Amino acid sequence: MFVGFVAATLVITYFSARKASGSNAYFAAGRRITGWQNGLAVAGDYMSAASFLGIAGMIALSGYDGFLYSVGFLVAYLTVLLLVAEPLRNAGKYTMADVLAYRLSPRPVRAIASLSTIIVSTFYMIAQMVGAGDLVKALIGSVISYNEAVCIVGVLMIVYVVFGGMIATTWVQIVKAILLMSGSVFLSVLVMSKFHFSISEFFGSLSHITSHKGDAVITSDFLTPGMKFKNPLDFISLSLALVFGTAGLPHILIRFYTVPDAKTARASVVWAMVLIGVFYIMTTFFGFGAASLLGPDFIGKNGGGNMAAPLLAREVGGNLFFAFISAVAFATILAVVAGLTISASSSFAHDFFTNVIHHGKEQKPGEEVRVARITAFVVGAISIVLAIGLGPNANVAFLVGLAFAVAASANLPVILFSIFWKRFNTAGAVSGLAVGLISSIGLIIISPTIMTIDAATVAPAARHLIQHAPLFTLTNPGIISIPLGFLAAIIGTLCSREPSAEEKFTELTVRANTGLGSEKATAH
């Protein structure tokens, strides 16, 4: 099944490669993706290993508190739909920085926005690669080691992006979304059949779940809060990062450039919300089903929380279904990693190489695409090295949390102010991005997430970082770093004036709301 899926995606890449000539086709799929196709692709891009494997495991081990992740991930799409999707599609060309550079001084803004995009994408990507390594090791560990599994994922993602560009990435995401939704529906039906399709019987089974801690037997009610979030501030901090982070995730934002116009961009968000909403409701059945039918002890001994959904599939559907769900999880990782790579490589090529180094002038035809392809190789290689360095026991949840917190603290304030605040200027954008990046990463480094990781599971080179008690007690920095990002953008703006940015505000507002003068689809 693994080989079958990989072969299918390589066929898609082969046909896409013939169409991926020229910047518009390579970076934005020629802006010819329809609303429902982009909706499926956005859903495919968003439902990552953290969603499918991580949330199912979190609900299976932490009950109600784990389900709050599902709620946060879904509610986040309202921010995207109401505030970001339409203006972004109308005002930009290929990347998030296009919107900022429209009325601000382009070089400093693009340089730091490109850095932010690459940091968020790399952190998010390492989490997916570690997840892939764990998954393959648990399934066929006797054949392939963790390091080899990470290398395979890295090489495949480089192939998709280097040869197929955005067209291949989009279709890999669409195929994966269809597979994931069909597998999830089937798994949910099989789980409910064990409870005679009775919701009350299903939830009733969760009030007395036993687990062992040493010699003690603990009976838990999985429907009561407090199993994971002991500190309410921790929960608020995570919620802020999830709800505001999605609207600043570069690999989600660039999906809106692949559609012909803003109306289609809005339609694709609605399609994505329906699919993602249904999927996150089904995570209830996977997570609580695994807790009830397998028990936390069994999950803990057989690969931990990340393996809860595949183990549940084996319990209710046998080995063949186990292989299918695991292949779908692998497909999930490949599709998300391809989306992350193309967002990082297009940002470097379009923002940094063309617009910062060469002042917006492409030196030779096709050079921008060539630079993006080289960047995809480099980003892929860095991710492989970091994922192997962190090792298979790395706590990947903190990496995804970090990506969301950085996106919410650095990217979202400057995108919103650029579109909605006339006085906003280059000084505000640079200070907002810089403070958001530094504060979110700095707080995570001194938080319990890094400082209390078991030293034995960390690569020797990083051990000296984690020998102290955490200086910052919350596991997610969002509650402090997001307000800091907004505050820095406001203070930076008020400290200087930029008449040219204010003059262009009306032009940007008209374009963002009507689409006049925005990038159009290329002809067939």
Image: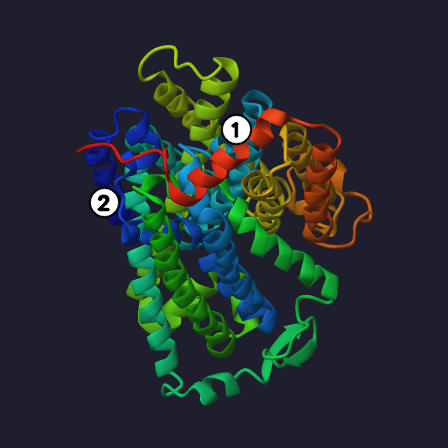
Specify whether residue 326 is in view.
no
Task: Return the x and y of residue 480 as percentages of the image width and height.
Answer: 74, 49
**Residue most toward the top?**
363
Q: How many marks?
A: 2
Q: Earlier in the sequence, mark 2 or mark 1?
A: 2
Q: Is residue 329 above or below residue 129?
A: below
Q: In the image, what residue type sits under mark 2?
A: Ala
Q: Quadrant of residue 161?
A: top left
Q: Nearer the viewer, residue 436 or 221?
A: 436
Of all residues, the one furthest to the left in this rendering is 524
Q: Is residue 9 above or below residue 219?
A: above
Q: Nearer the viewer, mark 2 or mark 1?
A: 1
- The residue under the point 58% across, 23% down is 105
Q: Residues within 10 Å of mark 2 (few under 14, many from 20)?
A: few
* Cα separation between marks 2 and 1: 39 Å
Q: Secondary structure at mark 1?
A: helix
Q: Is residue 270 above or below residue 206?
A: above
Q: Is residue 487 visible?
A: yes
Q: Provide the residue designation for mark 2.
A: 8
Of residue 48 and residue 452, the one placed in the foreground of this image is 48
Residue occupied by mark 1: 101
Estimate how packed mark 1 is, as few (under 14), some (14 to 19) or many (20 or more) residues with alpha carbons within 10 Å.
many
In percent of width and height, residue 70 lies at 51, 64
Q: Quadrant of the C terminus?
A: top left
Where is residue 175 drawn, in percent x and y?
Answer: 28, 51
